[in-house]
Image (cartoon, rainbow, N blue to C red):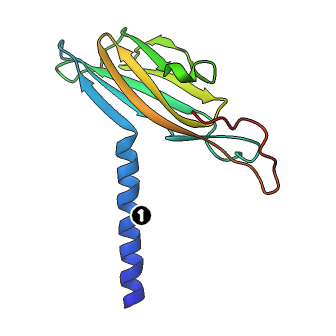
């Protein structure tokens, strides 16, 4: 009976941790015009290195825009940017795009490990997400390669 209670407790702990992690990947803000901007990140961690196979090497950024009535807004320009310290080491493609069916997406990749911030902006609305870029090396690997911390 104690083992059963332990397993249930562990499952609840893991489940609550997963729900917290999912909440951290999405942020929302509202504008004076009543638009809301939500930024969703497909992966809060991306991986570099030869042993990163099977791990996310990029993150998809999706900005969603709704009007005051909650309807999806088309044709608004969304600009995606990495923080200045990461220019040349992290890339968002495309950097600017228009919403279609209320959403605009871009892909974030990096060449350096560390903690980076990326933003999505529509008019005066700005949402920021944090992504951890990590190096995954196999046993016996040298420390060469992308290993500069930001």
Give residue 90's quadrant in the image: top right
Q: In this view, does 145 lie above or below 67?
A: below
Left or right of 63 on screen, residue 146: right
Q: In which quarter of the image is the C terminus?
A: top right
At a point 36% along the width and 83% down the height, the residue shown is: 5
| Of residues 93 and 67, the one drawn nearer to the viewer in this rendering | 93
- Position of residue 76 measured from the top left corner of the image (x, y, whole percent): 36, 9
- In this rendering, is residue 45 above or below 71? below
| Camera-side residue of 141 and 13 | 141
Q: What element carries label 1?
A: helix
Foreground of the two, 88 or 16: 88
Which residue is rendered at x = 30% and y = 17% of the image? 125
Quadrant where the N terminus is found in the figure: bottom left
Q: Where is residue 96 in the image (x, y as percent from the top left)?
A: 48, 11
Q: Residues within 10 Å of mark 1 (few under 14, many from 20)?
A: few
Q: Name the residue under label 1.
A: 14
Dividing the picture into quadrants, the one containing residue 100 is top left
Q: In which quarter of the image is residue 68?
A: top left
Report the side of 46 relative to 40 (left or right).
right
């Amino acid at each position: 009976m104690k083992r059963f209670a332990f397993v249930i407790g562990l499952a609840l702990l893991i489940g609550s941790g997963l729900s917290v992690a999912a909440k951290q990947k999405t942020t929302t803000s509202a504008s004076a015009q009543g638009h809301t901007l939500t930024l969703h990140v497909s992966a809060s961690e991306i991986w570099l290195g030869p042993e990163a196979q099977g791990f996310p090497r990029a993150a998809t950024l999706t900005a969603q825009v709704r009007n005051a009535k909650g309807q999806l807004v088309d044709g608004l320009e969304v600009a995606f940017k990495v923080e200045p310290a990461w220019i040349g080491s992290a890339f968002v493609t495309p950097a600017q795009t228009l919403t279609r069916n209320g959403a605009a997406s871009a892909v974030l990749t990096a060449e350096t490990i560390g903690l980076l911030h990326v933003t999505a902006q529509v008019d005066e609305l700005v949402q920021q997400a944090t992504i951890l870029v990590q190096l995954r090396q196999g046993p016996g690997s040298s420390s060469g390669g992308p290993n500069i911390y930001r």
